[in-house]
Image (cartoon, helix red, strand yellow):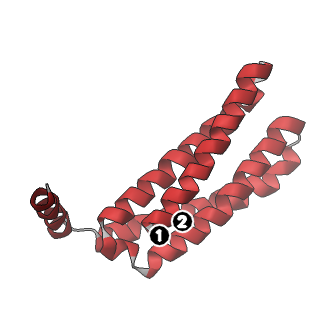
Amino acid sequence: MGVRFIKAAVVYFLIGLGVGIYMSSSQDLRFGSLHAHINLVGWVSMALFGVIYRFFPKASSHKLATIHFWLYNIGLPVFLFSLFMLLRSGSVKWEWGIIPSAFLIILAVICFLINVFTNVSESQESSISSTKNTSV
């Protein structure tokens, strides 16, 4: 599951760069919050999920990781598109997409939280450290 999150994160990184370049070149700064959400909720958070799942295979192989992945990857694009349309049009009717998609993202993060607290342990961390030390 870690690799899937990392690959998705890189896509959001590219999208975030594109939005940032557009804002800079056009001096149209109204999309600043969209740019921040793409980079933080898309690129950074997903990359961190991927790294954590990569380092803790027990959490990565748990069913909660799959639920987390799909809820997050359904909710986030809908959230970002709805936010883009809200900022572009100024119409609050786009909140119909923001609110339920934000709820999906929150559910995904709750799955991640439960997964981390139940399947990530210090014993796994020490085995990672010993493996890293022996391979160096």
Left or right: residue 91 compared with residue 25: right
Residue lying farthest bottom? Answer: 63
Work out whether residue 90 can be spotted: no
Kindly state the secondary structure of the residue where label 1 is placed: helix
**At 58% across and 41% down in the image, what residue appears?**
39
Q: Is residue 18 left or right of residue 127?
A: right
Q: Is residue 57 visible?
A: yes
The spot of residue 26 in percent (x, y) is 80, 21
Label 1–label 2 contact, CB within 8 A: yes
Q: Which mark is residue 36?
A: none
Asked if residue 99 is positioned above or below residue 24 in the image, the reply reads: below
Q: Considering depth in this image, is 119 or 90 the residue closer to the camera?
A: 119
Q: Amino acid at mark 2?
A: Ala
- The image quadrant of residue 129 is bottom left
| Extreme-top residue of the structure | 27
Query: In terms of image quadrants, where is residue 70?
Result: bottom right
For the point 10% across and 61% down, the residue is 134
Secondary structure found at label 2: helix
Disc 1: CA contacts within 10 A as few (<14), some (14-19) or many (>=20): many
Q: Is residue 116 left or right of residue 77?
A: left
Amino acid type for the residue under numbered disc 1: Cys
- Is 121 in front, or is 113? 121
Residue 99 location, x and y as percent?
72, 56
Mark 2, residue position = 108
Q: Image point 49% across, 46% down: which residue? A: 44
Q: Residues within 10 Å of mark 2 (few under 14, many from 20)?
A: many
Residue located beneath label 1 in the image: 111
